[in-house]
Structure formats: C-alpha cells, structure tokens
Image (spheres, rainbow, N blue to C red):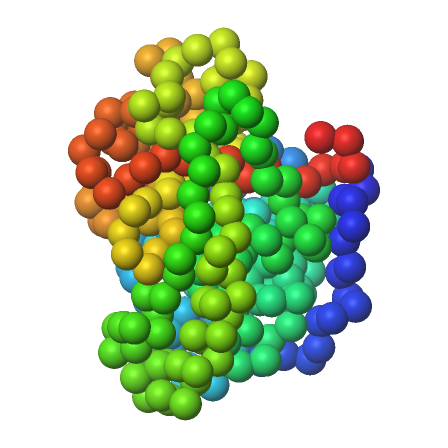
Amino acid sequence: MVLAGLVFGMHLQAQSVCYTREDSLSVVALLKKGSTNPLVYARSFIGVPYVAHTLEVNDDERLVVNLRELDCTTLVENVAALTLCARTGKTTFKDFTDMLTMLRYRHGRIDGYPSRLHYFSDWIFDNTKKGLVSDIVVNPPFSGIQKLRLNYMSTHPQAYKALKNHPELVTTIAAQERHITGKTIRYIPKSKIRDTKLMRQTVKDGDIIAITCNKKGLDIAHLGFAVWQKDGLHLLNASSIYHKVVEDTTPLRQYMKQHPSFTGIKILRLRTSKKQ
C-alpha cells in the first residue's frame, strides 16, 4: 500500500537520536512482525511502565526513543511509527526514527524545543497535512464542536523543564498557541459514546482516541487506541492510574463519566491510501 501525500526524506536532516541498544533491538524485532494493524504493536507494550516526561532528558532538543517507559503520547507515537513503517515496507531502526521524527515534529523537522508538536490538536493538524493520519469528523456522531483556546504552556512555564530553563522560548510557544487558538475541532460528546451500529461503523479497532477536555488552556487530556469488546468501546492506553500500559477493562463510556473535565473523543486513523 502507498501512503497518500507522504514526504519521507524531504525534510529529514541528520539528527542526534537518544536511545539505548535495548530500544533499537526492540524496534527491529517489532518491525519484523510486519503487521499493518496498530493494535498488534499497541498490545506489545501492555505492561510497560507509565512514566511521564521521558522526552525531557536533554538540554538540546533531540529525538528520544524510549520503548521501556511510556506515557499516553509516546505510546501513540511509537505505535503509529511502527505501523506506518510496516505499511510502507520500512524495516530498519533508521526508518523508524525518521518516521517518529516526522510524526513528533512540525513539518518533520527538529529545530529546537518549539518544533515539537506539544499540543495534540497541533499534532493532528500537522500530521493530517503530511498525509499520515485521517481526522474522522463524520456527523453524526461527531456533533460536538470545540473552539480551541490554548495557553497552558505559556501561562505555566514552570511546569516544563525546557521553558523553566530557557524562558526566552515562552514567546515562541505563545505565538504557536495564538496560531491554533480560534480553530475548531469536532468530537463525539461523551454522552454519545454508546455501543451502537453507527459507533461501530465509525470507530474502528486501532483508531487513535484523543479525549477532549474543558480544562482552561488545554485541548486534549488523554490518548489511547480504540478496542471494541462485547460490552462496548474500550481504551488501550498508557495509564497514570494503573502505572502501566493496559487494555482497560472499564468501558470507555464509564471511564469518561468518572472524569468531569472530559467532554468527548476525537478519532484519528492512520492513513493507508488516498481512499479512506
């Protein structure tokens, strides 16, 4: 299969990659699976410890590959990179790091801390343009509309190692926030997350689920992968509650009710061809 609109190699420059031998061997072993199903890779990480801030290990911005410790974003990015490599016949560690760079950074180019796609809405916009993901927005059930108002990073710089150590970067981050602010995204309201024929037709196993929220200055609260079970839709995710990657036994509808700030879900699908 040929991925639509991809520009592999066009923007990828020589880069310094932060990884261990264990990481590189794990990537190659996973790529040997050759699966085009993201759940195959996602389930390979079940039990891996949840650890936050694993990308904040260098003073200078470098590509970090860490499959031994994951948060919700790095789980999604690693699984997406593995799946997209498999779908394009890429089998080497360099292929993987190129793909991960493409997903994680604006225009696929590492150019300091602000070049990383920190807000997931920005991640969606950028990777949709690259042809890496499809933003599913069919209405119904995507009846919710959120107008983005992003400023959390620039108003809480002390919460981010790079901004705390380099306050001059806050201006750039604030400019990026203003560029996204005002845009709208469609989502499925959490009251509509039901086990219906429409939902099963709309949300596919292995789709990326991005949980929208009403927290001031933020857009997305959590990420994972869609898994349909007999009792409805579930989330495979790197969980801060369970402290590891799990395929949650609690249906997503119930999980959403436990978090008042969660408003609904966006659905992203890794691209395979022009027709999706």
Left or right: 175 in relation to 134: left
| Residue 35 placement (x, y as % from top left) | 63, 36
Left or right: 79 in relation to 15: left
- Which is nearer the eye, 23 or 15? 15
x 36%, y 88%: residue: 167
The quadrant of the picture occupied by the C terminus is top right
Give the tally of numbered discs. 0
Task: For residue 240, say whether it is visible.
Answer: yes
x 53%, y 66%: residue: 179
Left or right: 245 in relation to 268: left
Task: For residue 75, say whether it is visible.
Answer: no
Question: Does 16 sit above or below residue 224?
Answer: below
x 79%, y 68%: residue: 10
Question: Does 25 sit above or below residue 159?
Answer: above
| Residue 241 placement (x, y as % from top left) | 20, 45
Question: Does 168 sit above or below residue 244?
Answer: below
| Residue 131 placement (x, y as % from top left) | 71, 49
Quadrant housing residue 59: bottom left
| Residue 135 placement (x, y as % from top left) | 59, 40
- Which is nearer the eye, 50 or 21? 50
x 56%, y 17%: residue: 201
Left or right: 30 in relation to 229: right
The quadrant of the picture occupied by the N terminus is top right
Quadrant housing residue 67: bottom left
